Amino acid sequence: MNVFDTIQAIRPEVDPMPLAARRMIRESLFGVGHEDSSRSFGARSESGAVVSTAPRGTKVPLRKRPRANGSLFKMATGVVVVVVVGLIAWSVFSGDDEGTDVVGSSAPSTADTVADEPPPPSTAPPLVRTGVTRSSPLVLPVELLAVDEVSFAPAAAGSSTLLLTAPDGSLLWMAEFDGDPANVDGLDVRQIGAVGVGVPSGGQGPTATYRLITPCGGAILIDAPGAAPDRPEVIALFESMSVDGDATIDVSLPDGFSVFDIGEAATTFTAQFQVPVFAETRAVRLVQIPDGSISQLMFGARQLAPTTFLGGPAFVDAAPADPALVSVYWQDGRTVFNISSNELTFEDLQSFVDTLEPATTEEWTQRFDSPAPQPTPPGSACAPQPSFGPTLNP
Amino acid sequence: MPLTGAAAARLYDDHVDAVHALIARRVGSDAAPGITQEAFALALRSWDRFDTERGTERFFLYGMATTTLRNHVDAERLHLATLRARASAAGGNVLDPLVSGVRHADVRVVQHEANEDLRDAGAVDDSDFDPDAPDARTMRAVADLDPDDRDVLLLSLWESCPQSAIAEALDMSVGSVRSTLGRVRRELKIAVSRDAS
């Protein structure tokens, strides 16, 4: 251990500023008012997070989890899933419809567990469990952990993602994306109500996927894993859909449908860490999207179940392709997070997140010696490009 | 032009915890709230020095906090002695880096007196302290650093500030920060080796 490591290792832990002192200082500086967020639960969580990080050089206090036989296989499976999701993303946003087949091949065949609660009310103050702020919207481990994968993906130009809850409680994922004039090669296109809908010419895989035809770019809808192709709920949804002359996609949601989540695409930061657990390390993948949405984070057919993570609302992947995978989604402030591992428990992941520290994008790139995130590349010159309309995105 | 109103309140809400944590690490939790208030007052008064093109609010505030801490050297010294006493009471294995330096050759008078006061009051028990432990030697060397160098070092190692942020906070060039950290590393290494021998 060199001298700098030694100094880092004894970084003193300090207690959070007492709320009373925090409020007193605030009022002495600004008077009473100015939307005092220190009076909200969210602010209290934020104040705790800043000082709850482990001192440098200490090990993350994770509980050891018995490893099942064939964990390497599970790990490899997880990597395959990641690659497949990446391929889906690439194919969707590049207009390559062959990707729809890949969705089916990687999805589980059943979806017994579905989201049965609406998302937290939008009027609730944002709960900040990680200490992220507008200026430090990301989190990083305090320690310099080994990483297997580091990447960031600029926001896809003009893209938005949407999650709809169907009457049976299942989640339908939808995305609209900019692009060149719609390419329908490999699709069987038919008219459903007022819109054109394409499905893979070779037939649906285990997860039914539909392409909404728009003048430029397009929109894709992925049904819940295991749902029957052309099930009545999906047909009813398309029958209620319209695409106007500006390529605005609107839906008069059929009875029983509701918007679970919607958001515009934002830059994604991904890192897979090797987290020390006793004498070994475990792979943990952390995806962060400042100003993003849960629907973008999910990217594809997933079914979510509500849970409580670090004292606040969150969701877990209820039917992951890899049964050993624990995958948690939540929002803090303006950042959405997904942490997943097939080698750690839910509680372990919670412990790990509790040790993370807010970071700026500059700190993120410096930590990994990564190039700075680039602005979103310009989209296609084709017009009009699709967008979700006010019925979906009020 | 000072920063006022809702924008100032938002600045405070976003960063008060981080600024308070920095200050508490240097002077302890008791003195930290008051100094945090001073740091924010200074930051709001000096807001015209903040260059939105160049830096971030967080690191500008770190600079204000570091500047304010210079006015509280006595509080910092007293905190060091208190930490030293607490570490001793806990078994002496976890030592504040600067306090460990108090015990040896270059004892600063105020620190020494503070320690003596605490010892007289029964708060300090040196029996478990190993002054020759490698960590203690390293931290003694840190305590002996020039205060300007120590600010750079602790912003880097305790607050995880990148070099560009330290430059912003302390109104230095990035090159100066880099050369300072390199020089401090060499000095510490030499000091620790010399102490060991």
Image (cartoon, rainbow, N blue to C red):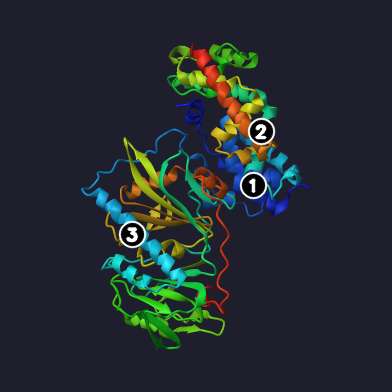
- Considering only order in the chain, which callout, 2 or 1, is on the residue closer to the N terminus? 1
Image depth: mark 3 or mark 1 in front: 3
Question: Image point 54% across, 18% down: which residue?
Answer: B190
Camera-side residue: B134 or B181? Answer: B181
Camera-side residue: A254 or A176? Answer: A176
Quadrant of the rendered image containing residue A143: top left
Say yes or no: labels 1 and 2 on the same chain.
yes
Residue identifier under label 3: A81
Camera-side residue: A306 or A320? Answer: A320
Q: Residues within 10 Å of mark 3 (few under 14, many from 20)?
A: some
- Is disc 2 placed on a helix, strand or loop? helix
A320 relative to B101, above or below:
below
Q: Position of residue A137 (x, y in %)?
A: 54, 52
- The mark found on residue B176 in the picture is 2
Q: Chain of mark 1?
A: B
Count of number-bearing discs = 3
Q: Position of residue A317 (x, y in %)?
A: 35, 60
Quadrant of the rendered image containing residue A100: bottom left
Question: Image point 61% across, 48% down: which residue?
Answer: B13
A237 relative to B138, above or below:
below
Amino acid at circle 3: Val
Between the residue at mark 1 and the residue at mark 2, the CA separation in whole angstroms equals 19 Å
Amino acid at circle 1: Thr
- Is disc 1 placed on a helix, strand or loop? loop
- The mark found on residue B180 in the picture is none
Residue identifier under label 1: B56
* CB within 8 Å, label 3 to label 1: no
Amino acid at circle 2: Ser
Q: Residues within 10 Å of mark 1 (few under 14, many from 20)?
A: some
Image depth: mark 1 or mark 2 in front: 2
